[in-house]
Amino acid sequence: MHSLASVDFNSITSIFEWLVSQWWAWAIVGVVVLFFLVIWILPAAKVKASPDHPTTGVEADEIALGFLQIVNLPSGYWNDPTASLLGDREKKVLVDQWGVHTRDEWLAHVERLSTVRRRREVWMLYLAVRTELAERLGRAPKAKEWLAAIVQEGGDKRDARTFVTSIEYSESEVRKRVGKDIVTPGLFVKTLDGYGIGQAVAMTTWGVALGHGDVAEARAIIHRINVEGRPAFESWADFGLSYIVGRVMHWSDGNVDEKAFEKFGDGWSDFQAAATEKRNGPWATLTWSL
């Protein structure tokens, strides 16, 4: 093998012989290029649904609200109210993590997630200021405008700046990764409730798998969650954005940077799949307004 020091750069033959001797480096480059080429050529995986449950109609539309949490666990096909993919080990972990040992505990968690959710009062106030300002301006407020409005309402400037920066960073990352055709430039987070609502639907299906309730009861609970939760959102994309940003904000304690988003915002890929018709995404075909 020729060392770089022994190469005569005035001789084409010497340069060629050196390049050939670096076969190991070219092999590594080739493997890397092939890897990315395969990823680019292969079609993205399609969303799978259970043939035993509806993929169209009201029942499918309502359970689709829990898509991001159901497929993230994963506990079953997105349209499966029985969470049939949960094995004994997964059920035990679920029970221990959530504390749903009994039917009463399960119902209490569903109620908490679908009402109180994962709300923080000050965050709700900051977002309310943004929504009100957007209505006055006829557009999404800029960060400086939003921050000034919060301070004007008596909010702490330092705390508000961290919140505003974290929300806008998270929105930007979701939009960039999911696609501007789905999360359009004018769409912005008005509430973080999407995360809790999505989890409430998933929790309802988990209860069936754990034997705390049956499918008929689960359908009724999921219907109520939809009736009460959907009015806060205008579309599937609006809901999905709220879910992802809400998840990142909750687990990062409201201080989002690149590391935090990478760790807690991974659901963006499921969001993209759900909203893509070519991948059989339910959000791409099911209506938002029931």
Image (cartoon, rainbow, N blue to C red):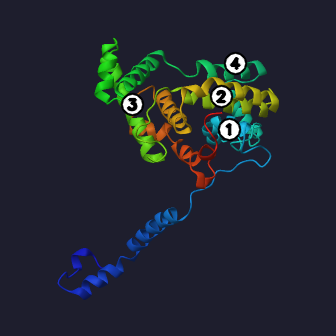
Which residue is found at the position 47% from the left and 69% from the top?
34
Judging depth in this view, the residue of 160 and 276 nearest the camera is: 276
Judging depth in this view, the residue of 84 and 143 nearest the camera is: 143
Which three-letter amino acid code belongs to the residue tagged 4? Ala
The residue carrying pointer 3 sits among few (fewer than 14), some (14 to 19) or many (20 or more) residues within 10 Å by Cα, namely many
Q: Could you tell me how far apart the alpha carbons at marks 4 and 2 are, in whole angstroms?
A: 17 Å
When the figure is inspected, residue 274 is found, relative to residue 69, above or below; the finding is below
Which image quadrant is residue 22 in?
bottom left
Q: Which mark is residue 226?
A: 2
Tell me the SS state at disc 1.
helix
Q: Which residue is mark 1?
A: 61
Q: Could you tell me how far apart the alpha carbons at marks 2 and 1 are, in whole angstroms?
A: 9 Å
Tell me the SS state at disc 2.
helix
Upstream in the sequence, badge 2 or badge 1? Answer: 1
Upstream in the sequence, badge 3 or badge 1? Answer: 1
Pointers 1 and 4 in contact (CB under 8 A)? no
Which three-letter amino acid code belongs to the residue tagged 2? Asn
Q: Which residue is mark 4?
A: 108
